[in-house]
Image (cartoon, coloured by chain):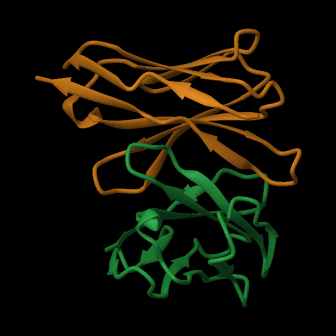
Amino acid sequence: GAGVSQTPSNKVTEKGKYVELRCDPISGHTALYWYRQSLGQGPEFLIYFQGTGAADDSGLPNDRFFAVRPEGSVSTLKIQRTERGDSAVYLCASSWTAGETQYFGPGTRLLVL
Amino acid sequence: GEDVEQSLFLSVREGDSSVINCTYTDSSSTYLYWYKQEPGAGLQLLTYIFSNMDMKQDQRLTVLLNKKDKHLSLRIADTQTGDSAIYFCAESTVNTGFQKLVFGTGTRLLVSP
């Protein structure tokens, strides 16, 4: 069956621009997570959705970052006024429920020039 | 706070066994995971172990958990060149209501013919 998909696979933008990153979870998975992986590091938690609501956004670095999941399936991570330090791979994961194993997508590689 | 540490690099010959080690600090960890990441790809779940287990074997993979020392290891038997990748261990607790994964920095495994 289809796994987690993320688009675009690569995104190059200029400092100060706005970007949106999309995640399509595995069908039927109610829980969705965003992580950020900087070069040479392990992924770091950003935000968790249960259904449509952001149940934990404690990992978002600042208020330039925002994520939505309006219909409880697809999620969009939005970054305003991008900075060079936002360059990283943004990973999305989903699971059946909150306590279940997380399955990761291939990630979106964001480069801010 | 939570912290997960791994050695950065491991080199083995094809056919040998590989042992990748990980230490963690959160004594309330419920699950411990091993993920594999190949270049340009997302995270592939390899295996996981519950914190009340000492060992888990899955084909060529053996996970050992020493809860007293907070030490986790992944042994890959008969290592193949296709096993070359970065391996991440991750701990999680569900006391936040969901599995918030905390990853190590990853161990790069290089398998030479």
Q: Position of residue A15 (x, y in %)?
A: 40, 79
Measured as percent of width and height from the top left, residue B80 is found at 23, 27
In this rendering, the count of numbered labels is 0
List x then y, in percent, for residue A56: 80, 64
Residue A113: image quadrant is bottom left
Q: Where is residue A110, by image quadrant? A: bottom left
Residue A107 visible, this angle? no
Residue at 43% x, 22% y: name it.
Answer: B7
User: Is residue A22 depicted above or below B41 in this figure?
Assistant: below
**Going by the image, does B86 lie left or right of A100?**
left
Front residue of B99/A83: it is: A83
Q: Colour of chain B?
A: orange
Q: Which residue is painted at 72% across and 24% down in the image?
A: B25
Residue B89 appears left or right of B42: right
Query: Looking at the picture, does residue B11 appear above or below residue A44?
Result: above
Residue A83 visible in the picture: yes
Q: Which chain is green?
A: A
Q: Position of residue B12 (x, y in %)?
A: 24, 16
At 42% across and 35% down in the image, what residue appears?
A: B87
Q: Is residue B64 left or right of residue A13?
A: right
In this view, A9 is above or below A74: above
Quarter of the image with the N terminus of chain B is: top right
- The quarter of the picture where the C terminus of chain B appears is top left
